[in-house]
């Protein structure tokens, strides 16, 4: 890559972030052909990277978790801001190269690379307070929910996701795009979209639009058992989102629509309403009401 060439020539012009030339050189060096399956669209625009890091409010000295560092575009931006980075990458070639890239472009920074599937990690070398990532698009929601479930140290974050997914994560009840991901995400805190990202900053150029989504973690409204039960109810409600809750939740609440209606009424929810009208607290209230009925 150019950075190697500059260093070898003793020229003090080593870029600190990856631009199109460095991305091209690195991909060539590693013989990487980006795959759709792994959602590999690499950012080659330093301004976009700095904007993400700034929007995320990354503080010097804190530990940031990055999922899918790829060739290192965002990683270098986070390190430039003075953060320590824990990066989880599923692609072995990319995971292996990243420490070398950082050593050349920003020597002396603190980086741990974990070569793993982010959907399966349950331990990390360090507790991270913030998540900053350009997520692989096909698994962005499950990755987010998995991380929030397993890493309570994460207090906030900014992630880049497919626009449609971002709007869904941040949606309020009653909106057309409000769905299971919106309700589940809300269990963990507040979500908002914080900007759009041009397709042109990626290589290869994706055929979907991207947005930045931010979250601030809040107090979880219930226990872990209640969370599982709530999420199961949410899945049932949105699997048949056009149906009234007394129908869509019949299987989950007593096996009949009459039993479901009773459970919903006990929680103060109109049995004729639909899943898209309920907040996460409403689903939790139904779980609690049906637990109380079983115990009584
Ligand atoms: N952060 C880089 C950037 O902004 O240029 C790359 C982002 S690219 C959209 C997604 C990255 O996630 C790829 O490097 C891909 O290999 C990685 N990835 C895909 N699925 C993954 C998974 N399940 N766990 C960890 N990394 C994954």
Image (cartoon, rainbow, N blue to C red):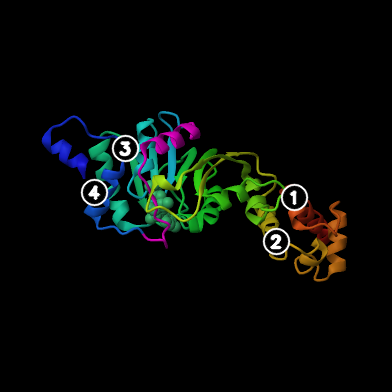
Describe residue 247's horizontal placement relative to residue 216 as left or right: right
Q: Nearer the viewer, residue 49 or 148?
A: 49
- Element under disc 2: helix
| Residue 89 visible in this rendered orientation of the protein | no
List the residue tagged with mark 4: 25
| Secondary element type, mark 1 | loop
Give the vertical position of 52 relative to 256 (above or below). Answer: above
Disc 4 from disc 2: Cα separation: 46 Å
Q: Of the residues under marks 4 and 2, which one precedes in the sequence?
A: 4
SS at circle 3: loop
Do labels 3 and 4 touch, CB within 8 Å? no
- Of mark 1 and mark 4, the one earlier in the sequence is 4
The residues colored magenta run 35-57
Circle 3 residue: 17
Q: Which residue is mark 2?
A: 238
Which x, y percent locates residue 62? Answer: 43, 32
Note whether ligand 1 is within 8 Å of mark 4. Answer: no
């Amino acid at each position: 890559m150019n950075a190697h060439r500059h260093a070898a020539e003793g020229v003090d012009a080593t870029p600190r972030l990856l631009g199109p030339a460095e991305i091209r050189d690195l991909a060539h060096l590693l013989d990487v052909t980006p795959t759709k399956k792994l959602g590999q669209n690499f950012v080659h625009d330093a301004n976009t990277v700095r904007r993400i890091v700034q929007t995320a409010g990354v503080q010097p000295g804190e530990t940031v978790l990055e999922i899918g560092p790829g060739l290192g575009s965002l990683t270098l931006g986070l390190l430039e801001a003075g953060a320590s980075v824990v990066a989880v990458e599923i692609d072995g070639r990319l995971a292996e190269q990243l420490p070398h890239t950082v050593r050349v472009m920003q020597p002396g920074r603190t980086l741990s690379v974990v070569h793993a599937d982010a959907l399966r990690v349950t331990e990390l070398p360090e507790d991270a307070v913030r998540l900053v990532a350009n997520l692989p698009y096909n698994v962005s929601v499950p990755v987010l929910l998995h991380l929030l479930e397993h890493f309570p140290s994460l207090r906030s974050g900014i992630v880049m996701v497919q626009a449609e997914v971002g709007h869904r994560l941040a949606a309020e009840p009653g909106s057309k795009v409000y769905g299971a991901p919106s309700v589940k995400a809300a269990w963990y805190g507040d979500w908002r979209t914080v900007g759009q990202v041009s397709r042109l900053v990626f290589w290869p150029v994706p055929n979907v639009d991207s947005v930045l989504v931010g979250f601030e973690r809040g107090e979880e409204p219930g226990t872990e058992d209640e969370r599982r039960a709530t999420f199961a109810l949410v899945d049932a409600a949105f699997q048949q989102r056009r149906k009234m809750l007394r129908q869509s939740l019949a299987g989950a609440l007593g096996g009949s629509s009459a039993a479901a209606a009773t459970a919903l009424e006990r929680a103060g929810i109109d049995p004729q309403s639909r899943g898209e009208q309920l907040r996460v607290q409403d689903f939790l209230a139904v779980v609690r009401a049906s637990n109380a009925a079983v115990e009584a």
